[in-house]
Amino acid sequence: MSAVVITIDGPSGSGKGTIAGLLASKLGWNLLDSGALYRLLAFAAGNHGIDLTNEEALKALAAHLDVQFIDKRIILEGDEVTDAIRNEQVGAGASMVASLPAVREALLQRQRAFLEAPGLVADGRDMGTVVFPDAPLKIYLTASAEERARRRYLQLKGKVGGVSLPSLLDEIRARDERDMQRAVAPLKPAIDAIQLDSTELSIEQVMERILSEVANRDLAGQ
Ligand code: DC
């Protein structure tokens, strides 16, 4: 692998999607939103009437998933699903299919294929532990569950009807529990990850911290 990868892992709502996107555009690198792959799989399973616990059928679907990432748009089996995969129901389905080892295995090569010059920012749960264990910079971004629920609430309020802060907090806690407790590739910081708690930090402050690590390692000029 000649291209460089920076991994950003963390729980749901920690801000890693925003940070990974900003970092990739600042560096002019590619972006892997690995959560989108699990979301797409859960969504496609719904379209095909496949049960979210049917590991064999999901493995086959994952291996042949017809998806294109075009700029910021996501096309699944010919239909644009950019916004449709972002709701909490699809997130919960993604978390379920993500607990199946055969599914994770089927998506592994697809994720590694995103690593192209000049570099990649990879956002997920196991980017630093499993998918890119040799990454020269690994960030583990977290925030309190209350703060993450509050951020999600502010994002959804006005766009989606019937959102409530207590139910978002319950959903975030349930998803944390499932993502951290699963047997295969659970959410946890890589041993060599830099842990950043963003509860009291702005997006700019988080970016500043990460960019100083990029500069320390001389990664941007490679
Ligand atoms: O980051 P996200 O909310 O879009 O991810 C959706 C779900 O996918 C998340 O609850 C767990 C799973 N996931 C995973 O298991 N491994 C990844 N690398 C990314 C996401």
Image: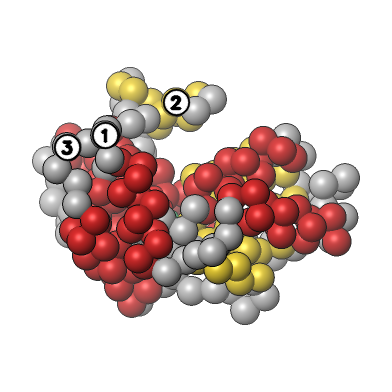
Can you give x and y, in whole percent of width and height, for residue 208 in the image? 72, 54
Position of residue 33 relative to residue 14, above or below, is above
Can you give x and y, in whole percent of width and height, for residue 147 in the image? 40, 62
Callout 2 touching callout 1 (CB < 8 Å): no
Q: Which residue is mark 3?
A: 161
Q: Is residue 184 visible?
A: no
Q: Is residue 65 visible?
A: yes
Few, some or many residues within 10 Å of mark 2 (<14, 14–19, 20+): few
Q: Residue at x 67, y 35 (%)?
A: 25
Q: Residue at x 30, y 41 (%)?
A: 156
The answer as to whether callout 2 falls within 8 Å of ligand 1 is no
Mark 2 vs mark 3: in front: 3
The residue most toward the top is 78
Residue 128: which quarter of the image? bottom right
Quarter of image, ligand 1:
bottom left
Query: In 3D space, how far apart are the residues under numbered discs 1 and 3 (Cα atoms)?
Result: 7 Å
Query: In 3D space, how far apart are the residues under numbered discs 2 and 1 (Cα atoms)?
Result: 22 Å
Q: Residue at x 58, y 53 (%)?
A: 202
Give amino acid for label 2. Arg
Position of residue 185 relative to residue 15, above or below, is below
Q: Which residue is mark 1?
A: 158
Can you give x and y, in whole percent of width and height, for residue 90 in the image? 25, 46
Out of 105 and 67, give the one closest to the viewer.
67
Out of 22 and 91, give the one closest to the viewer.
22
Left or right of 107? Residue 59 is: left
Q: Earlier in the sequence, mark 2 or mark 3?
A: 2
Callout 2 touching callout 3 (CB < 8 Å): no
Out of 74 and 63, give the one closest to the viewer.
74
> Callout 2: helix, strand or loop?
strand
Can you give x and y, in whole percent of width and height, for residue 15 in the image? 49, 53
| Residue 73 disc label | 2
